[in-house]
Amino acid sequence: MMQQRRMTTAALALALVLVTGAAACGDDDDDSAADTASDNRLDIVAADYSFALSGEVHEGPMRIDFQNAGAEFHVPALFPIAAGVTEQQLIAAFESEDESAAGPLLAGDPEAFRGMPPFIDAASSASVVTNSITAGDYALVCFVGTADGQPHFSLGMVTTFTVGAAPDGAAAEALPDADGEIVINDGSYTVPDNIGDGGSFLVRNVSGQPHEITIGRLHEGATFADAEGWINQYFAASFGEGEFPAGEWPADIVGGLLDTVGADDQALIVLPKLSKGSYIVVSESEDDGVALFRTDFTVD
């Protein structure tokens, strides 16, 4: 029997960016979404248990497409790393019981806003456009755990890549024009009337405190409570607390941001044309880990 390897203290310290409070999000291809930042594009394909990257990227507005080709949930947690740091060094640090083990390998604040796509379930995808990733070396890490207790990074879901310097002042460029805005208010979201058409939507936070954002479609007959209970149990089990939930998650991811969004942070969520159904936009405040709130909308 495979030895169980639960999430270590060091890995948990860096897994703060996980969207453990999110409850759902879509299943359509984003062929109809705006093709923004097409010349500066990073494609990430997650499998069980590896990342495959394509595209040479530089500082400035960057489109990131994240696809899950595996059978399990995966998360694209991004960390700035010191020059020359290897994947093997990172895995050893994350597996260490020493919470400070990863510190010397990092080159910046691991919790700074970078505008990464959210965690996604099997056979789903999510896209964003961000201009918050500066030049340097980065590690892409999945902190989700398997049913037998092994964190995905221990199985190979760590990869490194470089973001180049901005050519011709690209770093100073603003984000491309959006098709609408998703506004994080104090206790709710405002979503545009055209969100069902798909496109690029600017996220702004005017709530006065940091918030996550995840957008999802509930399966027919499912409630928010069903989706929330299932996903919370799943991620708790990923960190070695309790059993994995039975059955299928009654929701589908369509988009969102993995990073916590502050007042000065902005990114575009690129959505596909949404299929008919009931949707939710959900967040968990990082203010003492409370104030989970959501906004519901329907696509007819």
Image (cartoon, helix red, strand yellow):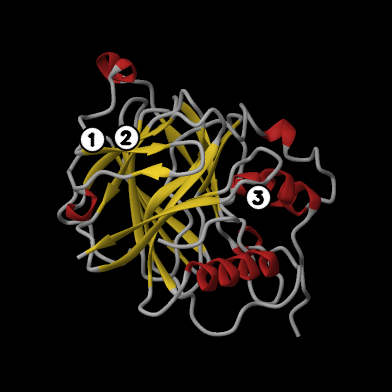
Q: At 51% from the left edge and 55% from the top edge, which residue is drawn?
A: 75
Q: At 73% from the left edge and 50% from the top edge, which residue is drawn?
A: 12
x and y, in percent, of residue 7 in the image: 74, 59
x and y, in percent, of residue 78 in the image: 53, 42
The residue lying toward the viewer, choosing from 148 and 298, is 298
**Residue at which label 2 appears:** 62
Q: CA distance from mark 3 to mark 2?
A: 28 Å
Secondary structure of residue under mark 1: loop
Say whether residue 251 is left or right of residue 200. right
Q: Earlier in the sequence, mark 1 or mark 3?
A: 1
Secondary structure of residue under mark 2: strand
Specify the label residue 88 is tagged with. 3
- State whether residue 119 is above or below residue 300: above
**Front position among marks 3 and 2:** 2
Q: CA distance from mark 2 to mark 1?
A: 6 Å
Disc 1 residue type?
Ala
x and y, in percent, of residue 48 in the image: 50, 69
